[in-house]
Amino acid sequence: MTTPPVHAPDEAAVPAARSADVPGADAGADAGERSSRGLLARAALLTAVLSVAGSVLGLARDQALARLFGAGRETDAFLVAWTVPEFAATLLIEDGLAFALVPMFSLALARRAQGTVPGDPVRALVAATLPRLTLAFAAAGALVVAAAPVLVRALAPGLPDHALAVDCTRLTATCVVSFGLAGYCSAALRAHRRFLAPAAIYCAYNTGIITAMFVLGGRWGVRAAAVGVAVGGLLMVAAQLPSLAGQLRHPDGRPDRRRLRSRFPFGFRRDEGAGAAPRTSTATATDAPTLSAGATAGTNAPHRGTAGQEAPAPRTTPRAADTPARPLALALLGTVLLFALCRQSQVLIERFLASGLPSGAISHLNYAQKVAQIPMTLSLMLCTVTFPVVARAVADGDTERARARVERDVALAAGLVLLGTATVVACAPQMVQLLFQRGAFTAADTAATAGVMRVYALGLLGQTVVGALARCYFSAGRANWYPLGAMAVGIAATAGAGAWAVGPWGVSGIAAANAAGITVTAALLVAGTGPRSVPVRVRRVLGDLARPVPVAVAAAVAGALVADRLAAPGVSPAVPLAAGAAAVVGVFAVLAPVLGVRGAVPAVESVRRSLRPVTRRLPHGRISLRIRFPLPRRLPPGARPRRPRKSRGSRGSR
């Protein structure tokens, strides 16, 4: 006896735009909109849970690195080589390649839904792009292996152990190929609304690194961590291949009918989205509803409803899905990769400036950055989930829906990251002590890392805004040079401020320059929205960004006071950390609704509803029941009402 396969919740397709042009579709559209929000919430929750698991494993990886090798010259050499996987992850998984491929796959899915292109556009896109990109990844990895000595000398000219850094760099260069393939799979799966496998890749990656360090660390030293990077990259690809192969196995891109019927009870097609009108037996391929609010593909003729009545004229907004298919544009790929490369070059500037400081400075910057960026990573999970939705809406010409989605995402991400920023600023010493202070990581390292982490946290809001708004600049699948220019201005500000501040303030000055530069970039991206990207309302976005700031400041002050009061030599750092974090959350929860932080009131109400008991006693112990009786029928003149017949069971009971 075989049991049916259990499908993860990420396999539900996230519906797209709602249709107002088909008569009788309003009720289904409203229900579909609620279903869409529920699916988005579940996908975001699933992605956040797995991202937290990956972040926890990342902390365990950093803990193992600190415990086994400390914060000395060997660790500094490995962290210079760690620049390669850091850049590869940003360029090929998180930002660069995803910004180009997700809109392209969304466009192919829209064409598949319309059925106007012969063959399967998704398979054609994979056949046209995957072989070429694989060759490019292999060539880039070979170039890194060959140029490792020059690369290390350019990144850290004052590094004591140059040969060790070269060895680690050559070992980590294999991640260029594995990360490229993993990023390709992630972009394709997210465009298909599959989030389980892409969210789990960092769990596999960090597991490979930790295992390699403990198994090979005694024999190979810090080189074992570089071997773990190569093994972890292969695990990232292996974790996604089965899911992607399952998507490409279906030529029509649809699962079996039983799964489709269970996920869409209103009769929607999988590729129509929850807002489209239900299909009827009279629908044809030419008037099938699509994501552009009922407009037919390639025509402006009036749309006919299910009852044969003429509906309002469909919108004539040009859709990207109506344009001819185009191959992978080098200009688009170049802009997104250069933008991601420019953004990640902040790390190069930091390590270049820190290489002339005493030993351990690069390690302190690395550990502080890893912990401080956890709130930013978690807050951007929502944008990662909704980026395919925005790209699909833009491909379908629904700019209003795309704008509402982007504005909502920026506001929610800003509130979440400021809550995390307040926690980091309030409890930084306790966090570092609890996570890293053991083995070769001393109390002096804890103090230095905590100070840098607090300064880093000042730029988390800017990092989040850049990550959220960069997606809307590239959501149309066209080359856009403005984000690169904004990022270049921010990098120039980081380099200038860092060169000036590293002398008097050391690593803290480098972290402050990082925060200043990314804030400049965020301001330029907010100011440049409009014709270049999804046209968000700038004043509303600025208001949503400004309202949580005083709340975060008050919460950070309260949390720091509580954490410092409970910190003592004989007390575990977990106690003041938990108390300080609770104080931050409490103050934030109280002040956020008062100051009108967007999303705070619905969040508090949902928590309050979840804490209510299922059954509750009404006032004065009374239970009110509402019973509806059928109204009597109106009889025609002269008719006599019929007496109800008695059943046989009622006679026998007497």
Image (spheres, helix red, strand yellow):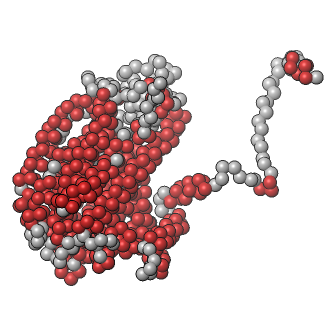
Q: In this view, does 615 lie to the left or right of 279?
A: right
**Does residue 459 appear in the picture of this structure?**
yes
Measured along the vertical axis of the image, is residue 238 above or below residue 416? above
At 14% from the left and 75% from the top, the residue drawn is 356
Query: For residue 301, what is the image quadrant?
Result: top left
The image position of residue 277, as x and y in percent, is: 47, 30
The image position of residue 362, as x and y in percent, is: 21, 70
Measured along the vertical axis of the image, is residue 362 above or below residue 107? below
Farthest residue to the front: give it: 219
Q: Is residue 289 left or right of residue 87?
A: right
**Does residue 289 appear in the picture of this structure?**
no
At 36% from the left and 67% from the top, the residue drawn is 435
Towards the viewer: 261 or 218? 218
| Quadrant into which the C terminus falls | top right
Measured along the vertical axis of the image, is residue 78 above or below residue 315? below
The image position of residue 200, as x and y in percent, is: 34, 47
Counting the numbered discs, the total is 0
The image position of residue 627, as x and y in percent, is: 77, 38
Towards the viewer: 384 or 545? 384
Towards the viewer: 590 or 595? 590
At 48% from the left and 33% from the top, the residue drawn is 263
Measured along the vertical axis of the image, is residue 565 above or below residue 370? below
At 14% from the left and 58% from the top, the residue drawn is 168
